[in-house]
Image (cartoon, coloured by chain):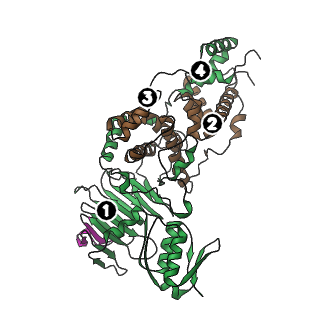
Amino acid sequence: MSDSIDWRIIDRHLAGDASSADAEALRQWLAADPRHALLLDQLRSVSAPDRSLAGESWNVDSAWSRLTGRLADERPASHLVLERTPASRQSRRVSWRLAAAATTALVAAGVVALLWSAPRASSGIASAPSSPVREVASARAQQTRVTLRDGTRVVLNAGSRLRYSADFDRLSRDVELEGEGYFDVVHDASRPFRVRMRGGVAEDLGTRFAVRAYADGAPPQVVVAQGSVSLARDDAGMAKGKLLRPGQLGRIEPDGRISVVSDVDVDRWMSWTAGALVLDGLSLAEAATEIGRRYDVRVVVPDAALARRRVSARFHDAPLPRVLDALAVALGARWSNDGVAIVILRAE
Amino acid sequence: MTRAPDLNATPHAELESRIRSGDVRAFEQLFRAHYASLCRFAYRYLLDTGLAEDLVQDLFAHLWADRARLELRGSIRAYLFAAVRNRALNMRKRQLVEHDWIRDEALPDVRALHRPPLPADRALDTGERDAELRSAIESLPERCRMVMRLRWQEQMSHGEIASIMGISLKGVENQLARGLQALRLRFGSGER
């Protein structure tokens, strides 16, 4: 057909790669039918930036200054190694060595999931931001590291979620935590950083601290590494809160009382951020929950007496079988994997 | 293939080693060169300018924090775009619970290829034509749209696009041919 043209010529033309032979072929094609010019015109506008896209006016200057605010606070990557991939999901560790084909490997990094509740336009047109809720979640067997807008760095342990409003940092700095999180807060007395959890709220007074408040019924607790934190019950004002100093652990007891333990092993409480699995004086049932969360497995202890036995152990990037073996030996138990769950039983 | 010399065309080994050694200016150069197009690309997946910017910010913050381990092969631009795509798809995977992403890349939309052509005698004004074109593009499968835009808007090579999208060179050609064919049919230039 005289008026047809190799699509590759059009492709090269639109991509700015046309050779002189291409240009000649294109000229002949355009001359063959006036509609060709119209079509080419249409296609050219594919390569033009979207006029309907409000965000085309990305402000590089302000973006750069926002980024540098964050960079100043970044420590060497060795401080918090979070792309750790425990046990069963030992996929590739993310490095910057990204071969062309290895695109899927990128997803192995701590996955930051941002969800929002506001209804959104289904068209390609950006909707006005309306203060939606954002959520960062860390799946089971995964840790997630995120730097909030104000520069505060958060590490979320496995099976945890952090919620905050999209206008976080503008008026207040409130976040809501379910699960376990480590916070390295950029202190700002005029805008206190508050972590809301089940039954209470922790307010930073310039600090690094960890909060543990899983929805498993265990009392929420806060351990302070540096600076101080005020821990208060939900319904009490911050003024009634207990002040926690470095090395102290505050716990919101089931009756609402706040208990404080001094001189706890802070490193031990924070060590999960570096990949450790700490089972510290837990019942085997609690340890099973913790192991399940960390390795994304189901661990059951059918024997009630065995489930009540206390364990204390610490592992560092250990494969799951090693963890289970260690517990089994310590408790005189055995474990098996039936494909659905890991079952821990008394050794006969 | 000739192209105006730019950051991407120059060997980036030097830039890369400067960034690795903590040279903020080199890092800024990289950021400024790619920020807008990366945001635009992220936006196409997320349809939210705020999220798109956050994603790109996080990517660069991560890149800087981990600069000591920076070691790139191939085009630095392709690396950045691939990282944006992966992060965006990841975000969306999580959102699937709440949002029905009908634009999923994997979902072939054959209907788009069988729309009736517009009447040839109907002159469209510019606005109408733009809207018509946009809807024609939007109705293409996502992967096809992304490939077309990377090629014609970002003026990337087929190789770069292949590595970003995780498909073969042949796959890139197929997507481009398919997209062009669909638009051709839609705008009825008389060829079948």
**Colour of chain A in the image:** green
Q: Are marks 4 and 2 in contact (CB under 8 Å)?
A: no
Q: Tell me the CA gap for discs 4 and 3.
A: 22 Å
> Do circles 2 and 3 both sit on a common chain?
yes
Looking at numbered disc 3 in the image, what kind of residue is underneath it?
Leu
Q: Residues within 10 Å of mark 1 (few under 14, many from 20)?
A: many
Can I make out residue A115 in this image? Answer: no
Mark 3, secondary structure of its residue: loop
Looking at numbered disc 4 in the image, what kind of residue is underneath it?
His
Q: Tell me the CA gap for discs 1 and 2.
A: 45 Å
Q: Which residue appears farthest toward the right when viewing the image? A: A1
Q: Are marks 4 and 3 in contact (CB under 8 Å)?
A: no
Residue under circle 1? A194
Q: How far across and how far down the image is residue B112, in percent?
A: 68, 37
Residue under circle 4? A13
Q: Is residue B22 magenta?
A: no
Residues drawn in magenta: A226-246
**Colour of chain B in the image:** brown
Q: Are marks 4 and 1 in contact (CB under 8 Å)?
A: no
Above or below for A276 versus B86: below
Q: Residues within 10 Å of mark 2 (few under 14, many from 20)?
A: many
Disc assigned to residue B7: 3
The chain holding disc 1 is A
Q: Are marks 3 and 1 in contact (CB under 8 Å)?
A: no
Q: How far across and how far down the image is residue A260, in percent?
A: 28, 77
The chain holding disc 3 is B
